Amino acid sequence: MQNWLLPEYIQDMLPAEAWHIELMRAQFLDLLRKHGYQLVSPPLLEYAESLLINEEVDLRTFKLVDQLSGRTLALRADITPQVARIDAHLLNRQGVARFCYAGSVLHTHPAGVTRTRELLQIGAEIYGHGGLESDLEIQQLMMRSLTLLGLTEVHLDLGHVGIFRALASQAKLDKELETQIFLALQSKDSSVLQSLIQPLDEVLRQALLALPQLYGNCAEVLTRARQLLPVYPEITAALDALQIVSQELQPMASSVGLDLADLRGYDYHSGMVFAAYHQGSHDAIALGGRYDDLGKSFGRARPASGFSMDLRQLYRLLPQQATQAGICAPASEDGALQQKIAQLREAGNAVVIDLLNDVSLRKELQCDRELVLRDGIWVVVKL
């Protein structure tokens, strides 16, 4: 095998993509900075027990043995657990803390056939506030970020794992049956679901059977949900929260839908969950939700809500970006030329020295202008 080949689903970023993604990252972080979010940059590698917060994360995490300690290390597959660790132990704040981040994560398997296993994850998180205001702030920031990065016509899906949690608690399900029902709901397999819930009372059976059908237009789903689901305080609170958030976010999205059987990250999230979709992709382009229990792994659970996105995925959905062309300059120690080059670079231009002075190779310099000497003055002309 040629030693220049890369592993499957691992790709280089070439100049056009790398520069544009770096610009997108800077734009995102600047937006979050203006909203009071503080940048953190956790390490790529940690002890495995700090990162393997559930079975799903475990399966997509690369692991290796530390040659210094003999302990198992893991290459992060998600930055959120690291931020929870930072909030719990390094900063130890008592009030609201806002964090943002941008860094690579590695997955053992790609999320889709066109996706890479090395994602460039960006995200934002709020710790220390359990109310609807922080859920709404996070979701609004996600939508503003997508617009800023060039993604429009975004559909937003909302859900709430608290609804299923309330039904499961009322039914006193054991862990195995709860997991089986969860999987049936995720696949919207009503026949399997109906078989699993036979031992439950009529109210709970009808409620669980209704969940896979409760998706689509927000107003319609909420109306049907209030008719079909039992009036438990947790369910009423969840539906009220979804109604408020969907109304607030409607102006920021091309459409907003509800899916009450979407239990993505059920053993991770504790409340509202959300996902953004773009017309050019079947996969979600941004994901998030509330995860108040995540900090338990580090001995200090705090209310938390956040979202994350993969910049490499977003870049591929954007129209092809033209590479910004530079100015070609001859290799010369002429003082006037050096002064002109310095002025052009100070003004933000890329000035490339043509070391080979080979016209046939000049296209590789990515320049559409050049510096030429006319009447003793260095001037910029089009190539």
Image (cartoon, rainbow, N blue to C red):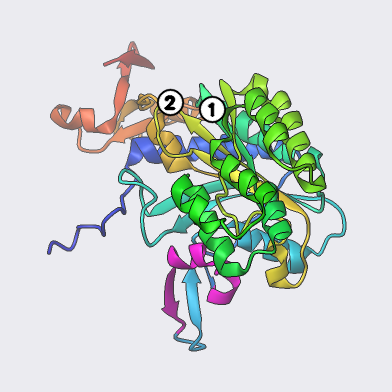
Q: Badge 1 is on which residue?
A: 155
The answer to which of marks 2 and 1 sits earlier in the sequence is: 1
Secondary element at tag 2: loop
Q: Nearer the viewer, residue 367 or 120?
A: 120
Q: Locate residue 132: give its quadrant.
A: top right
- In the rendered view of the protein, which quadrant contains the C terminus? top left
SS for callout 1:
strand
Residue under numbered circle 2? 279
Q: Is residue 117 magenta?
A: no
75 shown above or below 303: below
Question: Relative to 371, is 54 on the left or the right?
Answer: right
Left or right: 239 with respect to 94? left
Residue sticking out furthest to the top: 375
**Quarter of the image with the N terminus in it:** bottom left
Question: As rendered, which of 61 and 254 lies closer to the eye?
Answer: 254
Few, some or many residues within 10 Å of mark 2 (<14, 14–19, 20+): few
Residue 25 image position (x, y, % from top left)? 53, 40
Q: CA distance from mark 2 to mark 1?
A: 8 Å
Asked if residue 99 shows in the view, the reply is no
Tell me the quarter of the picture where residue 200 sits: bottom right
Where is residue 299 drawn, in percent x and y? 75, 73
Q: Residue at x 68, y 62 (%)?
A: 294
Judged left or right of residue 15, residue 45 is right
Q: Amino acid at mark 2?
A: Gln
Total marks in image: 2
Bin the neighbour count of mark 1 within 10 Å (Cα to Cα): few under 14, some 14-19, many 20 and up. some
Q: Residue at x 70, y 64 (%)?
A: 172
Foreground residue among 207 and 90: 207
Residue numbers of the magenta segment: 47-66
Q: Amino acid at mark 1?
A: His
Describe residue 300's horizontal placement relative to residue 324 as left or right: right
